[in-house]
Amino acid sequence: MASQYDVENRRETRLLIQWSTLAASNKIIGESLEGNPAYLQWLFIDQLKDTKDQVIYVPSRNMGLPILEAPRLIKPTPTAEQ
């Protein structure tokens, strides 16, 4: 029967292998996307198809500030003159 130390040691080893594998795959993905802004834009646009009736904040080219679209959803309140 394995001792508690052996069990913990195997668990730590397994986690280290998982984390290093994940880090390596993230590095590969990051490097492949670094020079491919068109794919990232397509991926962003593709994800918009599932955002029915939601407000989307799209970054502008001016200092990365969002373009706020929320005011277009606000219905004007009737005034006393109407």
Image (tube, rainbow, N blue to C red):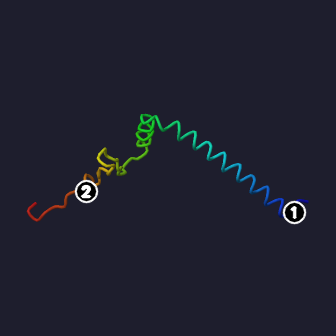
Quarter that holds the N terminus: bottom right
52 and 6: which one is in front?
Answer: 6
**What amino acid type should be assigned to the residue bearing mark 2?**
Ile
Q: Secondary structure at mark 1?
A: loop
At x 31%, y 46%, the residue is 60
Whether residue 65 sits left or right of residue 18 in the image: it is left
Q: Which residue is mark 1?
A: 3
- The x and y percentages for residue 58 are 34, 47
Which residue of the protein is positioned furthest toward the left in this rendering?
81
The quarter of the picture where residue 11 lies is bottom right
- How many badges with numbers are in the image? 2
Q: Which residue is mark 2?
A: 74
Whether residue 61 sits left or right of residue 48 in the image: it is left
At x 79%, y 58%, the residue is 9
Q: Residues within 10 Å of mark 2 (few under 14, many from 20)?
A: few
- The x and y percentages for residue 6 are 84, 59
Please say if 1 is above or below 65.
Answer: below
Please say if 22 is above or below 79.
Answer: above
The quarter of the picture where residue 5 lies is bottom right
Whether residue 32 sits left or right of residue 50 in the image: it is right
- The x and y percentages for residue 67 are 29, 50
Q: Secondary structure at mark 2?
A: loop
At x 44%, y 42%, the residue is 47
**What amino acid type should be assigned to the residue bearing mark 1?**
Ser
67 and 18: which one is in front?
Answer: 18
81 and 57: which one is in front?
Answer: 57
